[in-house]
Image (cartoon, helix red, strand yellow):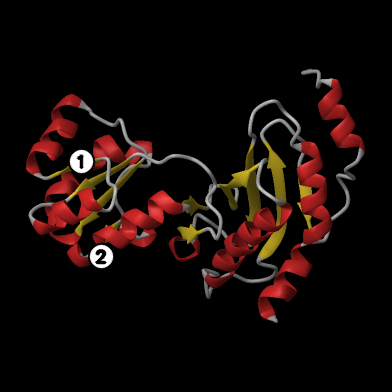
Amino acid sequence: MAQHGKRFRAARERIDPANRYPLDQGMDLLKSSATAKFDETIDIAVRLGVNPKQADQMVRGAVSLPFSAGKAVRVLVFAQGESAKEALAAGADIVGGDELIDRIANDGFTEFDKAIATRPMMAKVGKLGRVLGPRGLMPNPKDGTVCAPEDVAKVIREVKGGRVDFRVDKAGIVHAPIGKGSMSKEQLAANVTAMVQTLWRLKPATAKGVYLKSIAVSATMGPSVRLDPLELARLLEA
């Protein structure tokens, strides 16, 4: 069995794993556990009352966090003509059309974190599904990475500025990064609220029973802090 260090054990002693903490107190505990020498990533795990095997209960989407999660994102854009110029001006790292599609199809080029495509390009980009799909890089209208040509700059700025994509896994859990340990507890609380609010808005009409089953946040090297889903649900309903 893996042995945890003194720092981890000390943080775990302050956190009751059976408790569901209010958001404010939970952020205090989270901050106190993020004491590594590097800027730890803060992750959230939300267990939803859905059946991912049912197509109409597959929760996926994107959220623009109020405060950037801090990760530099290398963005590739499939666009041509004026849209390509706008993409470059908006800060896209790689922009191209047919030649870029051929490079990915023939050479397996995947040195980027997010791919965006304008709608006119999708007929050609579709053939890259076998390369990009397994890596989670395929543009998809459900998460906003397929857009109208006139919206490409807006989407790039969102992705670069703190947008996080998510998708429920087979166990009904959504995992996503929502910040850094160096952020204030107020900033982290705002990002948690934005994430949960987005999930709440995406609740499938066919989902029955409790939707927000559990919410946990953790730093890279720290223990999980469980939040009170009922408190957050009340905040969202207010």
Answer yes or no: is residue 60 visible.
Answer: no
Name the residue tied to disc 2.
Answer: 151
Q: Which mark is residue 169?
A: none
Q: Quadrant of residue 72?
A: top left
**Residue 89 located left or right of residue 143:** left
Q: State the residue in front, 79 or 125.
A: 79
Quadrant holding the N terminus: top right
Identify residue for label 1.
128
Q: In percent of the image, x 27 and y 40: which residue is there? A: 93
**Viewer-proximal residue among 26 and 208:** 26
Picture quarter with the C terminus: bottom right
Q: Could you tell me the amino acid type at mark 2?
A: Asp
Residue 214, image x, y percentages = 72, 56
Q: Please tell me whether mark 2 sits on a helix, a strand or a loop.
A: helix
Q: Is residue 198 left or right of residue 154?
A: right
User: Given the current orientation, which residue lies at the most extreme front position?
Assistant: 89
Kind of residue indicated by mark 1: Leu
| Cα–Cα gap, marks 2 and 1 | 22 Å
In the depicted view, which residue is nearer to us: 67 or 111?
Answer: 67
Q: From the viewer's perspective, is residue 59 above or below residue 160?
A: below
Mark 1 nearby-residue class (10 Å; few <14, some 14–19, many ≥20): some
Q: Nearer the viewer, mark 2 or mark 1?
A: 2
> Is residue 172 among what the camera can see?
yes
- At 71% across and 42% down in the image, what residue appears? 218
Instruction: Classify 10 Å Cα crowding around label 2: few (below 14), some (14-19), many (20 and above).
Output: some
Image quadrant assignment for residue 195: bottom right
Element type where label 1 sits in the image: helix
In the displayed structure, would residue 186 be above or below residue 134? below
Looking at the image, is 72 positioned above or below residue 167? Answer: above
